[in-house]
Image (cartoon, rainbow, N blue to C red):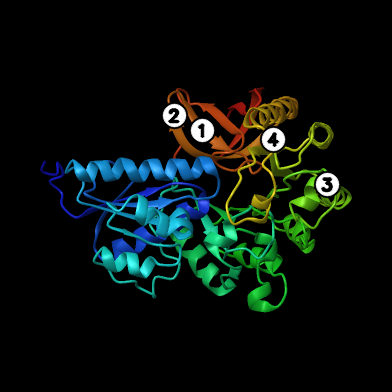
Amino acid sequence: MRARYSDKNKINVITLGCSKNTYDSEVLMGQLKANNKNITHDKEDGNIVVINTCGFIENAKEQSINTIIENVNKKKEGLVDKVFVTGCLSERYKSDLKAEIPEVDNYFGTTEMPSLLKHLGADYKHELAGERLLTTPKNYAYLKISEGCDRPCSFCAIPLMRGKHKSVSIENLIIEANNLAKQGVKELILIAQDSTYYGIDLYGKRMLSKLLTELCKVDGIEWIRLHYAFPNGFPMDVLDVINKEEKICKYIDIPLQHISEKILKSMKRKSTSQKINNLLSDFRNKVSDIAIRTTLIVGYPGETEEDFQLLKKWVKDTKFDRLGCFTYSHEEDTSAHDLEDDVPQQVKNSRLNEIMEIQSQISWELNQKKIGKTYKVLIDRKKGNYYIGRTQYDSPDVDNEVLIDAKSNFFRVGEFVSAKIYEASDFDLYASV
């Protein structure tokens, strides 16, 4: 069967997984654009397909494999000409994937972009410092400040796929931030595998506060948001910068995973419940209105009902502003894989639902307190009868959204408005201008 696409050599980049993958796809597409290639993102109209895969947990791996098979079938049917696979799954399981799905034209790891570009008829251009083709709404963009991770967490395969921690220099990040600002980006979302560790490899000490201070000087950027801060060794001077600099959102994403001493020790988190609680108290005492987001894992090997009840009570008492939860995934080549995966999946799912039900109630209660208050809101998009925006206390896709009536208002994406909350549910805030 002849391919249906009249526009030959159009490259469709499909992105799966986290914000780090989104960033990598944007860099890839920026390189392709600089080579005058015809590109599209997550569409159905490219005869050459590049799949940027995720290999973090079982569900993500399944989605990646299903996407590969779907596009290989399209190739067999003549609907696409070539299929290339890159990203974390390809990095971790390249030999297995080659054996199981040989119809893919080639597989590439997370550090093999120059080779991938060569197969796509493009040259890797080193002079494109931080230049990329954005796939997020034009008002915000991710800024990857480092790659890889040196932490020994027992459940995590990221070091196998992304390697050791490697910071990007402050100078290069400032160049990239300026380029983004020129494109109309208003909000920078700082991402890394471990943003707490930023700078140690380059400067011999933690330099996150210095980076934040320098980014605040970039004209056009109005919000800077911090994601993925590891709790151990968190540089407390960052809190001083958050208080001092108006551009830095009073928001922090800090994955804590659990609170049971036994589980924390088995996870190799090198922390204790007391250290964690002290750190959270410091956050709230030093930045009075900070919004704290965390992620938890339930169903880790050896997690008893007692451990889970302890976790539930802690979530109720701590009242995180934002919270995500995952069921434990038994990953090969991690140290936790040597343990018996002894919590049944049904129990894992039940525990996850219980945690999220608790958090839903907490979120509802916290949101009720917002009614009658006025916030600075960044407009992300228009959907149906509403403009959808966020406050500084909310990150895209995972946190609260502010809904403003679109029938009686007109805004542009990327515009800041002052909005008063008049109604609230557990994850939505309704506001009038």
Q: Residues within 10 Å of mark 1 (few under 14, many from 20)?
A: many
The residue that disc 2 covers is 383
The Cα atoms of the two marked residues, 3 and 4, are separated by 15 Å
Q: Are marks 4 and 2 in contact (CB under 8 Å)?
A: no
The Cα atoms of the two marked residues, 1 and 3, are separated by 42 Å
Question: Which one is in front, 276 or 207?
Answer: 276
**Residue 99: quadrant of the picture:** bottom left
Q: Looking at the picture, how far across and down is residue 104, in whole percent?
A: 29, 53
Label 4 vs 2, first from the N-terminus: 4
Quick check: 388 above or below 79? Answer: above
The residue that disc 4 covers is 343
The disc placed on residue 388 is 1
- The residue shown at (63%, 55%) is 334
Label 1 vs 4, first from the N-terminus: 4
Q: Find numbered disc 2 in the image and state the secondary structure of the residue it sits on.
A: strand
Q: Quadrant of the C terminus?
A: top right
Going by the numbered disc 3, the residue's amino acid type is Lys
Label 1 vs 3, first from the N-terminus: 3
Going by the numbered disc 4, the residue's amino acid type is Val
Q: Find numbered disc 4 in the image and state the secondary structure of the residue it sits on.
A: loop
Question: Which one is in front, 40 or 21?
Answer: 21
